Image: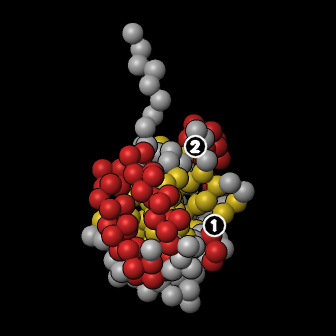
Amino acid sequence: MADTALPRSPLAHVRDRLAAATHASGGAVRLAELPFLTQVNVRLDAKSAAADALGLPLEPNTAVRQGDLTTLWLGPDEWLLAGPPGNARRLEDRVRETAGDEPVSVTDVSAQRTTLLVSGSRARDLLAHGCALDLHPRAFGPGRCAQTTLGRTQVVLVARDRTDAGFWVLVRSSFAGYLTDWLLDAATEYL
């Protein structure tokens, strides 16, 4: 018999704790999981016609939002396309079709990570507790991203396209529980 169980997010067991912390902070910090975002890793020549046609950002550590798709620059020839759940196949096909005969690597990595939304008036302060990056808006403002560590956990940190939209923290599913516990502990002073 086929397994028909619905997928379970890596943080389903802490959803109530995240909501309680958000409520207790009075808007200072909002913590929530954005489970199952589509995440497609793309590697191709940044100078190719396909990179241009796909609108891939060429400036290091930038994130570009086009509709419901956010494209993150991860390296000179590597990007992460992140969007609503269930769109991996469509994105993969679009990239391959656009690349045509050009060399390209397209990999669905949606199951590899989950995404935490960290927002609120003290979001930067909270993240600064465990991140060595300069998170001041002059250095890491809207549209910036970086592969870094947060609370000793490797993450991709994304400053959303508006200051009030907060940050995405993309973390490997196996470390999501630890990082969530760390964030909740670090947020105690704002609750």
Q: Does residue 74 appear in this view?
A: no
Q: Does residue 38 appear in this view?
A: yes
Q: Does residue 66 lie above or below 147 as drawn? A: above
Residue type at numbered disc 2: Pro
State the quadrant of the C terminus: bottom left
Q: Which residue is mark 1?
A: 64
Q: Looking at the rendering, which quadrant does residue 65 occupy?
A: bottom right
Secondary element under disc 2, as helix, strand or loop, is loop
Secondary element under disc 1, as helix, strand or loop, is strand
Tell me the residue at 49%/54% (across/down).
33
Q: Which residue is mark 2?
A: 85
Tell me the CA gap for discs 2 and 1: 18 Å
13 relative position to 39: left or right: left
Q: Does residue 92 lie above or below 169 as drawn? A: above
The image shows residue 12 at horizontal and vertical percentages of 42, 45
Tell me the residue at 27%/70% (across/down).
152
